[in-house]
Each structure stands twice: as C-alpha cells, then as structure tokens.
Image (cartoon, coloured by chain):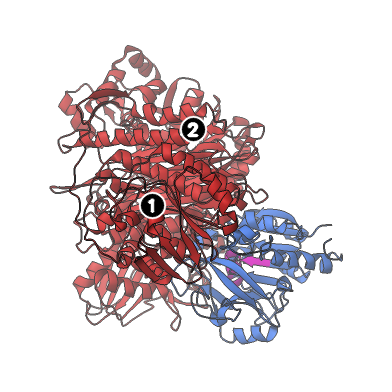
Amino acid sequence: MPHRVEVTTREGLVDPRGQSLVIRAREDHGIQLAQARVVDVYSIDLELDAETLEKVRLEVLSDPIAERSTGTGPILSGWDYWVEVGFRPGVTDNVGGTASEAIADLLGLPNAAERTVFTASAYALWGESLTRESVERLAHGMLANDLIEEVVIHSRNGGPQTPFKPRIPKVRLPENHRVQTYNLELEAKELEDLSRANTWALSLAEMHSIRDYFRRPEVREERNRRGLPVGATDVEVEVLAQTWSEHCKHKIFAANIGYTDEAGKSRRIENLFKATIKRTTEELAKTRDWLVSVFHDNAGAIRFTEDYHLTVKVETHNSPSALDPYGGALTGIVGVNRDPLGTGKGCRLLFNTDVFCFGPPDRKEELPPPLLHPRRIMRGVHRGVMDGANTSGIPDINGAVVFDERFSGKPLVFCGTGGLLPAVVNGEPGESKEVCPGDRIFMVGGRIGKDGIHGATFSSEALHSDSPATAVQIGDPITQRKVLDFLLEARDLGLYRTLTDNGAGGLSSSVGEMATHSGGARVHLDRAPLKYEGLAPWEIFLSEAQERMTVIVPPEMSERFSALAARRSVEASDLGEFTASGFLEVFFRERPVALLDLEFLHHGWPVMELPAKWTPPHHSEPAVPQTEDLTERLKSVLSRLNVCGKEPLVRMYDHEVQGGSVLKPFQGVHDEGPGDAAIVRPLLDRPDGVAVGCGIVPRYSDIDAAAMAENATDEAIRNLLAVGAPLDQVAALDNFCWPDPVPGPNNPDAEYKMAQLVRACEGLRRICLAYGVPLISGKDSMKNDCRIGEVKISIPPTLLVTAVAILPDIARAVSMEFKRPGDLIYVLGWTREELGASEYFAEFGGIGNRVPTVRVEESWPLYKALARATEARLVASCHDCSDGGLGVALAESAFASDLGATIHLDRVPLADPISRPDFILFSESPSRFVVTVARDSRDEFERLFAGLPHGFVGEVEERPVLEVRTKERLPLVMGEVGDFKRAWQAPFAHY
Amino acid sequence: MKPRALVLTGFGINCDYETGFALSMPGVEMEVEKCHANDLVAEPDRLDHAHLFVIPGGFSYGDHLGSGRVLGNRLKTRVGEALSRFLADGKLVLGICNGFQVLVKMGLLPGGGPGRLDNWTQRATLFRNDSGRFEDRWVHLKVCEGHNSVFLQGIERLYLPVRHGEGKLVFGEGVYEELEANGQDVLRYSDPDGNPTCRYPDCPNGSEHSLAGLSDATGRVFGLMPHPEAFLFRTNHPRWTREELPEEGQGVAIFRNAAEYVRRELLGVGAAA
C-alpha cells in the first residue's frame, strides 16, 4: 500500500513560501488571505512497515529542527481551503527522483533508479473572504500550471476531511513496437493533409522530394534487399521532418530571396545566411587567426590563451516558456549548457547569459487562454533560469530584460553559455569532431520519455489522466551536472573521441548529424533506456527528453567508458555504431525500421524562394510638450520598464561561482549601478579575462529593422569597450527572433517581414565588417506569432547580439560609476536629433521617424581611441549611452557613486544643432559614452581624442546633486542623486 | 611533507575548482586531492591520507528535500566510521555553504549533544532564508570574541559573498547556549562597522543570533555560509575598481590558517616559509 507523508514548517518559524503566497495573491490577483502555509506532500509507492516509514519520514523527508511531519494523517487543520498541486504523469519530478534515490540508499534497496516517490505541493489557505471561485482563480492562475499539473481543492465545508490518499502519477502504457508504413503516392491535397495530421510541418514541395526519393529504383532495390517496405516507415518520415524542420535546417535563412526596395528596384539574394552572416565571418577570417571553429559545431570557438579556446552559444526557448514559463526557461538554460559541453571534445562551462522579452508585467487585462499573463511569465521564466543556472554552478553574468506589449503573445527567452575548451586533448585538437567507422554510439544521461516530441504542438486537450504531458519538458540540472562532471573526467582520460548534445530532434538529430562525419550509422532503438513503456520506435528516436549527450567512443574504450559512468552514477547506453555505409540505419529488436541515404537526409530538401518587399513605414511625430524643468522627465524615463533597474531579479542569480568574477552586474559605492558588461577570469592562475556584453533594441524595428540590427550590434560592442576591453579580439553571436516571413493565407505582410529580415542581416553585416567583429555562432526562431481567434499578435523583429572580448589583463577593467570628486566628465560621440522609437517618445505614446543611425566612419575611430585610453588606464569610469540616452547614463553614473555633477548641456558634442534641450538629453544616438578622467590625465586623454567628438561637460562633485544646465546657466535638471536612484529602482523595488 | 586536503566532488557540488585553487595558493600550499563522493563511499579509507576534509559549496542533490540532507545522510551512513577516525586523529573539516549545510544536517556541526562529540545527531539546521529567495550579495562578518576555531585565528572581520537560499541557522532547544559557552559561535553577520546584526540585508537570511558560521567543540570542524573561496584576489571584490585593496583577497586567510595548523600540529613543522 502506498504511503503519504506531509511536511510543513514548524510553528514559530517564518514560512517564507507561505508569506510570499499571501503577498502575491494580494498584489497579483487582488485576493486577501489571512494566512497561507505550504505543505510538501510525498506519496511513496513502496511497502513499508510503520517503523521504516518513520525512519524515512524523519531522516529523509523532513528536517527535525525546522519542520513537522506526519505519515498518518493531515498535518494541518482548520484551514478554509486546501489546494493540492501534483504533476501529471510523465512530467519530470526532480525532487521525487532524489527522494526515490535517497530512500533506496537509506534502506539498501536494489534498484536505486526506480521512481518510488511522487511529490505534490499543498497550500493551506485561511481567509474570511475566500470563495471557491477565488481559490480556483488562485490555484489555476498562480499555484498550478494545468498543462503539467493537476489540482485538487478541498474546502472546510466541503464534507468530511478524511486523510488524503497518496497519489502515484505513474505513466502506464502498453508496450508499443508498432512501425507504420506510409504510401506517399498520393494527390497533393492528401500529402498536405498527411503532413498536417502528423504534425510533420513538411511543405508540399518537401513531401514531393520525399516521395521522389522513395521512388528511386536504387532506393527501392536497396530497401528490398535489406528488408524494408516500399513505402516510407514512420521512423523515416519523422526523421526527415525533424531534420528538415525550420528549427534544424534554417530554411528561411537558407532561402533564395527576391528583394524589392522602396524605389521598386529588385535584386536576388541566394541564401541569405551565406550572403550576409557567413560571408562576413569568412571575409574577416582571412586576417584573424584566432577563429578556431565557427558555424560547424554546437558553439562557436575562438582562441583564448595558448592552451584554451573560448566557446559560446546563445539559444532561444520561446514557445515552451510561453506554455510553462518555469519549465520552459529551466530547460532553456540547461539546454544551452549542453551546446558548449558538446562542442569539440567538450568544455568546462564558464558563464551563462540571459535576455528576456516580456509583455508589460503591470498589464491590467487578462489574456485569453492559453496565453499567460506577462507577470506570470516573467516570474516563472526568471525562477526557471535562476534555478537552472544556480543549481548547475555556472555564474549568470550578463543579460537584459525588454518589455513591449507585443511580447504578450510570445515571450522571448534567450539563454547563452560560454565554455572553456582545451586546445589539445590527449594529443588531438580540442575542437576535433572526428568520428571513425566502428566507433560506438553512446547515449549518456537521462532516460527517454515522450517529452517534447513534436515540440510544443500538442495542446493540453490532447492529455488525459494517464497519458504523459509531452508538450513541456522540465530540465533536471543535477542529472546534467553529473553528466557534465563525468564527461569532463572521461575526456581527460581519453575515453571518447567526441560528443554532441541531444536537443531538438533528440537522437535522430544527434546521431544523424554525427553520422555525416564517419559516413553512416547503425542504431538500435531498443537499447535506449526508457522512463516508461509505451514509446513507439519513432518516438524513442525523436524524443527531446533532456539531459542527454551522444558520445562517440572508440570500441577499445567502451568498457572503461561504461565503467566510469557507473562509478559516477551516470547512465550510459551503447546504442550501436558509426559506419561508412552512406546510410542512417535504424533497428528495433534487430528489425530494420529506417534506412536513409545520408546525402538525401541532409541535402535533399528543396530550397525555398521567398519574396521580400521593403516599404518604409511612416509614423506621426509625437507631440512632446516643452518644459523648462526636465527633472521630472528624467525621473519618468528612469522609471520606464526598459530603463529601470532590475537588481532584485539579478541578485537571485549566482554571478560569482567558480571564483573568477571581475566585474559584477551591479557596480558602484553601494553595488547598485548597472554595469555595461561583465568580466570573468576563467583561469585563476592567469590574468586573462573574458568580457561579455549584449545589445537588443526591438522597438527600432518599428521604423527600420536595419537600424534595429545595427544599433543592437553597436550596443553590444560598446558595452565591451565601456568596461575596458580591447578591440583586437571581439566576436559576436546573432540570435534572430522574427514573426513568420513566409507567405500564407494568414500572413498578408510576409513580404514586409522578409524585407525586414534582409535589412537586419545586411545591417548586422555592415557593422561587423566595419568593426572587424566576426560572427561565430547564431540561431534563429522564425515563427513568433500568436493567434487568438481573429487577433494575431506578432513580436517586433528582434536581433540579440551577444559580444565577447578577450582581455589580456583583467586589471584594465573599468566600472561605470563616477570615482572621485574633481574628475572631469566627458561625453564621447556625436549626439543627433534621433528620437525615433526612443524611450522618450514612447513616454509620450509616439514612435516618430528619425531612428538612431550607426555611422561607422565616425564611431570606429572613436572606439579605437577609447580602447587606447582604457589600455593606458586614463579612464576612471565609463558608461554606455543607450536606452534613455545621455540623461540616463549621467544619472546612473552619478547615483552609483553617491557623487554629484554639474553638466553643461551646451558642451555636448552635436553633429547638427538640436533645438530642444530635452532632445539632447534623451536622444538615443548610438556610439556614445559618458567617461570620467582624473584631472592630471586630462592632456593625455584629450590628445587621444583630438579631432574626434568629445565634450568636457562638467566635473564630478562631492555634493550628491545632479544638475544639468543650459548655455544660459539655467538649471534644466536639478535633484539629489538618491532621488534619481529611487526613481530608477522603483518599478522592481518590491519584486 | 605538504599538508593534504581531500576536496569532495560530485552530485552537484560545484565550487570545487576555486576551493581547490585556494588550497594550493602561495602561503596555503596544500596538496589537493579531489574525490568524488561515490569514490569516498567505495573507499572511505581515502580520508586517512588527508589532514583536511573539505566539502565545497554547490547544490548537492539539487537541495531537494532540504539543502545538504541527502549528501549528509549518505556520508553519515557510508563514511561515518572513517570520518570519526579522522576527527579522533585531530584533523580538520571545513564545510562551505552547501558543505556547511551537509555538516549541520549530518550532525557534525555543532556536534555535541548526548554521548560523544561526533554522535551524528542533528541539533541545528540551515533553513530557507526569511526573504524566501536565493541571493548573491556581499556581507560583512565579525569573528566572535572567544571563538574556538583554528580556521579563524588572527582574523577579526571578513567581507565575503553569500550565495544561498537556505542559510538561516535555527537551533534546537538549548543548543545555542551550549555553543556560546564553548566558543562555538564563531562568525556573525555584521553591519559595515563590525557590529553583529540581524537586520536584512546585512544579515541576509534571518539567522538566529545573526550567526554565519559555527565550530564544533574542538574548533577543528568549521562551517560557514559565506564563500571565502570567492574572494581570493583583489579583483573579486565588488568595488576593487574604486577602492585601494591588497592583492590578496580576504578569503585566503581561512585556508592558510588550516594549512598552518596542519603543519604545526599534525606535521610538526614551523609556519610556511
């Protein structure tokens, strides 16, 4: 008989989870609770006698000092409502897994991997005004996600309160070894229907390519000889659909594009990716010997020291985070960790980055299902990334949060990871991806379930009580940490040749990809360990169950490899071997279930032809009332969501584990000022550092996506410069998130969105070439639209640029806050009247048209001078001007130091006259910095900037007051720096 | 002969790189052996070769079922005997953050209670922060007068980061009074002037008696929530770009004290050259 154990915080101790529930119920849902208490519920599927249960309860499941528990009945009584939330069958229950293992260990049970414990959270609620309806709202709107969890609600007056029963949400499915065969000799409509019915997302052209492949006489003959049917098996079509998916093959970026500009002039672009991004890197590579591996592997690699390379990858996890913000984001961060881990022969992981785009959290109206309120998405995503990164022991060092109404339909969750790859591993280059015929295919890490099959296309309706929730995966950082530790140990012992991660498409993708290195592979799906029975062979092959790596092990090492895995409590399964046959061969119980020509698998898809038409939009100029006192205006801009401080969120990330923290996210006298970029020192016995910055400005796409991309790129590079990084070894990563640019019945403006994409790619290329910054890795997510009934919400086209720089010496790092009274304040770079799509215009509800423009012929000489100045240690502080412009940068530099300044606005370098002082203060012209310099460095500093736009605008003052004056010496802004700080902190002060 | 440290790894421990580095820094100079928890369980005698046993920070078993509990149980039941011998030999144990949580949950800290010193009864706990959140922030620490810790000799104050969600020390009935009498209440959160305080955020978690670290009765077992291994260099300090600071970070002294104690008391040699 299963047992139920309930655990809660001992009376008299603070129950922070209960307290936070009361606050969130009130603030987020307007529901008044007198008290809430949280109870951890464990259902144990083991036969235990009373004494053993007692031992388990007291030694494993509860804390003897701070908690109370029972194994025989309810632990709390007197509540008005009891809400219990447990996982649906098949949803990853990490705590349940650990509890199963800990109990097996304590009791000496033979099968430690067996799931015997299932967890649930119960919430005991007290409140006079509570009703069934308000509790339901709380349960489904805050406490549970119906997609992955089930809710039970009891009320005090709802009948007899017998002890609740244990709940064992095991997946129980019959064995399923069925392999279906499809006849593809069908009419066009039938082929399209077949693709849709199976969620293959294959176009008619693609279905035809597949049909034609199976028609080939040599294919028919080979299949016949090897015992495969004439038609395609489900394994084969699923593998093709997955391999040819937009996610894996980036078909839009690989398309040929007919681009028509505003003058009606047309040109053709063959393969947008190759023509812009790849070409940029190839051209730059000719004069840069530090590019180690670009575009080929899971992460890009550049040289760091003579002994190590730096690898970086940034990914998005948007759709899963929309459905289950916590699980989606957690999976996003631990998922991108596997990219550097799976690069070359494997990396130690150095840092994480995270950039989020959300709808405004203060949105008043609820959104129609399945959309979740932006506040809920924000909380869940933040907690998911926090748990994933912190638990994995990887410092989260850089990021941003962007808000825009249009992200209410689809949030963007970018997660990045950097790694350290030894230049040489056991005599071979660390970046080697060599696979030899005869090498064994090992799957290492988690087991396979129905997780993530066909991504997030399954809706919650498809779920019933005993069927696994396939739509959403929940990461398990501790399993992955064990895998990571084991693999790095095995790497250094030379026990494997190379490895790759199992992400989208699972084994089908990882094995299919690695097979190209040897020329073939033979996989036995029945040898893969499953979480539960009932997976069809194709599901085993495609499952996106997390925490798995595919490792290529020379046959002579396989025994030692397996033995070490066992010693590290990591599951490693030999699934077959790599060959040189030219085929991907798949078997189930010795029966052939797939045979695909590798050439066809990877190159057989038809290239798309896409139209793009650029028509520049025109917006009305917002009416911005003039005022003589800009103090309140500055505070309003500082309080805008895209400008304000997010310190409470960021403090919850561990940003200094591994001991290499050099510049932290928050800087200044009280550690409250926003740093421009982070710096870490990966090797504690070396002075070399890595600076990491990012740029993102989706709102500029409202005017021109080219400007959006150029400004994002400029901002990322600017961030690195601001912290003192030199320019000779800077690399960038591009992550595009776009609304669907492929024409279709529901997509009337596809040509415009495609034109935006072309312009963004070309803008990115222009800046990268000018600054000599190769693009070493990237990713795109092209379907960020959401349709509810008749309403379609599309995100603004968004490019995130992540930039990294190598610093030969971390001691040259510069932080953003003013340092000493008497230091001289300079504004570097031209300010223009560029307020189109600015935060200032947005404050007045408008967009305007004059979008900030990057002028590389001006910025590049300025950047070189600034890099020389930081190298010569002439710069006391440096802060980038971005969202909110000069006014924000000045205020931040001042309040972070508790020092003041008097700024003469007429000394700000203007390329052309600007009539209004508020436009000078809030223009978002790119390529500008606020820099302070010690008085005795003045001459040397000014010499470096001779002929370049720089204005000595004022001095740092002891008195903590920020004053901005006009030419007539009239005060435009005047306020205590602390007041500006409070305005800047206000929106998230109580997060 | 160099003092030897055994540094535990595996199952989510994740500060082993910088902790190992700290132990081998100039002036500390210990020989560092990293040992996976499974290997220690398989061969508990590996402890016999070491003078200092370190459980670094991290998230062993993901903090599931309460931080440190699962690893603590495992060490208690599988390595307990070897660890008792290790302690009886007068050797040192250091637990940082998650390591401290492990030592407390397995009963090694504060130790004492009925019977022997190492009788493995949990008498205190490290529980969820009052704030309900994991936080990374630097805190001021005051070494308590009359403390018994060999790790804190010659140190009066420290400035180190905390990075935890479960760092609130809670004591069983009468336990604190006993610790105080023995000088086991060794390290407290303080305000910037060095006055112990329970006020958030100076005290980041709501710890009883604002305690950040404890000794056992011998002073040779030490656990603390803040991370000395995260402040090894000037450049780790959050304000090194604006303050004049010595090259060496304040965390190093704790590791040096351990090494010097081993040299002096266990190896019978003078202080490091």
Q: Position of residue A797 (x, y in %)?
A: 29, 43
Q: A958 or B149: nearer the eye?
A: A958
Circles 1 and 2: CB distance less than 8 Å?
no
Q: In percent of the image, x 51 and y 41: which residue is there? A: A864
Residue highlighted by disc 2? A294
Left or right: residue B79 compared with residue A89: right
C-alpha distance separating marks 1 and 2? 30 Å
Is residue A824 placed above or below A941 in the rendered structure? Answer: below
Tell me the blue chain.
B
Q: Amino acid at mark 1?
A: Ser
Question: What are the residue bounds of the magenta stretch?
Answer: B94-105
Tell me the red chain.
A
Asked if residue A206 can be seen in this view, the reply is yes
> Which chain contains the residue that carries disc 1?
A
Judge the density around disc 2: few (<14), some (14-19), many (≥20) Cα neighbours within 10 Å. Answer: many
Is residue B83 placed above or below A344 in the rendered structure? Answer: below
Left or right: residue A377 compared with residue A428: left
Q: Which mark is residue A174?
A: none
Quadrant in the rendering for residue B74? bottom right
Q: Position of residue B97 (x, y in %)?
A: 58, 66
Q: Quadrant of the C terminus of chain A?
A: bottom left
Q: Secondary structure at mark 1?
A: loop
Q: Quadrant of the N terminus of chain A?
A: bottom left
Residue highlighted by disc 1? A882
Q: In percent of the image, x 65 and y 74: which residue is there? A: B157
A229 falls in the magenta region: no
Dominant secondary structure of the residues highlighted in magenta in the image: helix
Q: Position of residue A518 (x, y in %)?
A: 51, 24
Left or right: residue B213 compared with residue A331: right
